[in-house]
Amino acid sequence: MIDLIWDRNETLSREDMERLQLERLRSVVRRVYSKVSFYRDLFEQKGIKPTAIKSLDDLRHLPFTVKDDLRNNYPYGLFTVPREKLVRIHASSGTTGRPTVVGYTRKDLSTWADLVARVVVQAGVTARDVVQICFSYGLFTGGFGLHYGLERVGATVIPASVGNTTRQIKLMKDFRTTALVSTPSYALYLAEVARDMGTPAASLGIRVGLFGAEPWSEGMRSEIEAYWGLKATDNYGMSELIGPGVAGECGFQEGLHISEDHFLPEIVDPETLEPLPPGSRGELVITTLTKEGLPLIRYRTRDLTELDYSPCPCGRTTVRMKRVTGRTDDMLIIRGVNVFPSQIEEVLMEVQGVGPHYLITVDRKDHLDEFKVEVELAADYFTGQYRHLESLERTVRDKIQSILGLAPKVRLVEYKSLERTAGKAKRVIDNRKLR
Amino acid sequence: MWVKQISVFLENKSGRLAAVTRILGNEGINIRALSIADTSDFGILRLIVDDPAKAYSKLKEGGITVSETEVIAVEIPDTPGGLASVLDILDAGGANIEYLYAFVSKSSGNALVLMKVEDLDKAAAALKANNIPVPGAEQVYNI
């Protein structure tokens, strides 16, 4: 396997990387201080001048930025350029409140395409590939982000967007798609539909898959790879930072290389906000080093991961982040125990006979939390006997209990009865009125 | 030829049983006997139909979770004590019954009992040795 690398900055020595990062950090700090009143006020409150940044270590003295800061400055308050200089606007869905708006200058768009090019090249895509993008094109950054990055690499792009799943399969067949871009849950759904259409996913000849936009597990990866016969890689990004293109996996699938010449990563303790040493699990915090329109200082991603600075056999020297295993804000606290939906997903992937789709419901009855896990019975696992179903439910319950110390009520549901979505899957319903 | 029984996994949710029987009705499949048992979460519907192979594939196509199981049919005089004497024979013959359900045949006036047993051959042998009629599959489908 020839593993191509898109940009020489992906192979800088640690010393050169840190020199570049410091230079860029000082420049972005000066930029936000002089152009964004929100940051100037924050710096002044903390008594920090941009000239105080002498080393990368001084990063810890800078204030954090959170999602609410973007909301409070809706829509254009955090931009460093006049609106006329922006050539593109994207925004978050706003499902959890006021949408967050991000803007790109012409240079930002070019940087973005280059960063996505790094991600798709390290996933194994080349100019010879036909790539079907099953992300929505719109305010969401996924569709356009991947689109321009793939075009920059020279691949043939099919902007299929989401929905109309039978047509997606037909397009794959007719256009001989070789690479797929989607959410991991949509990849599983596509595979089911393909099978029902009598064209098993593995027969479609897709060899590479780039999956992102929602948390997923190693088990889900094996399932997708088995269904499709492709190599499934994870990639990471968020609209506030740029969109997709922040980090991605190489062929070794052991963590996501962060483009740290553009995104300076830290791991902090989500409670104390103190930086943690490499190898510790905590919240990922990113300072954008090269964004023009909307640079962010120490942006709290809410994603939980850890950083690995050890060398990667692929030849890239950039730091790797582990797969995101949860978010500080979708962590459920059930009877005082921290529960991440991803932990439950891992269990469900291990148990034969239950499908990848699940729904967690939390209720509070008589001041006690109760949680229920509904999971689909795999269609070909049904024997017609109660004891098999009961033992399956018991296995799932016991495994979850051994991991969380809490026993859920497990309920087997019919195959395909849980909602499938082309976007981010809804996995949790919390009915407790805690606020 | 053992009798083929169709088992269907049903969530306890309104309309599911109707959905299953509608598929069978639309395909012209006639239900000969059925049994349904449930827990609070799910139920298993067991069906004897006139065309089990077609029922299996049509239900599967309709997205229903389904499986096929072989059961034994036993004809029992429709009189008090009829079932008890048959069960004694099976017990003595070492055939372990997992579940059973019954219906009364229109033609013979006898009760037909469908049994899921661990060892079909053993059960059939015990019954035949005692002159208990064991109708074949075709006979049961066409009752």
Image (cartoon, coloured by chain):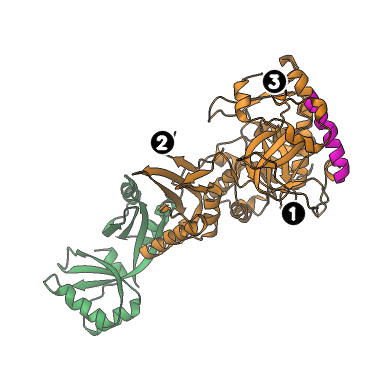
Q: Is any atom of residue A201 visible in this view?
A: yes
Nearer the observer, B23 or A286: A286
Q: Is residue A177 visible?
A: no
First in sequence: mark 2 vs mark 3: 3
Q: How far is the residue under mark 2 from the one under mark 3? A: 36 Å
For disc 3, the neighbor class at 10 Å (few under 14, some 14 to 19, many from 20) is: few
Circle number at residue A252: 1
Mainly helix, strand or loop, the magenta region? helix
Question: What is the CA distance from the residue labelled 1 to the residue labelled 3?
Answer: 44 Å
- Magenta stretch, residue numbers: A12-30
Q: What color does chain A have in the rendering?
A: orange
The quarter of the displayed image where residue A114 is located? top right
According to the picture, the residue beneath numbered tag 3 turns out to be A41
Q: Is residue A87 left or right of residue A434?
A: right
Q: Amino acid at mark 3?
A: Asp
Vertical relation: B65 (above or below) A108? below
User: Label 2 is placed on what type of residue?
Assistant: Lys
Cα–Cα gap, marks 2 and 1: 44 Å
Mark 3 belongs to chain: A
Name the mark on residue B82.
Answer: none
Percent position of residue A362, x then y: 43, 44
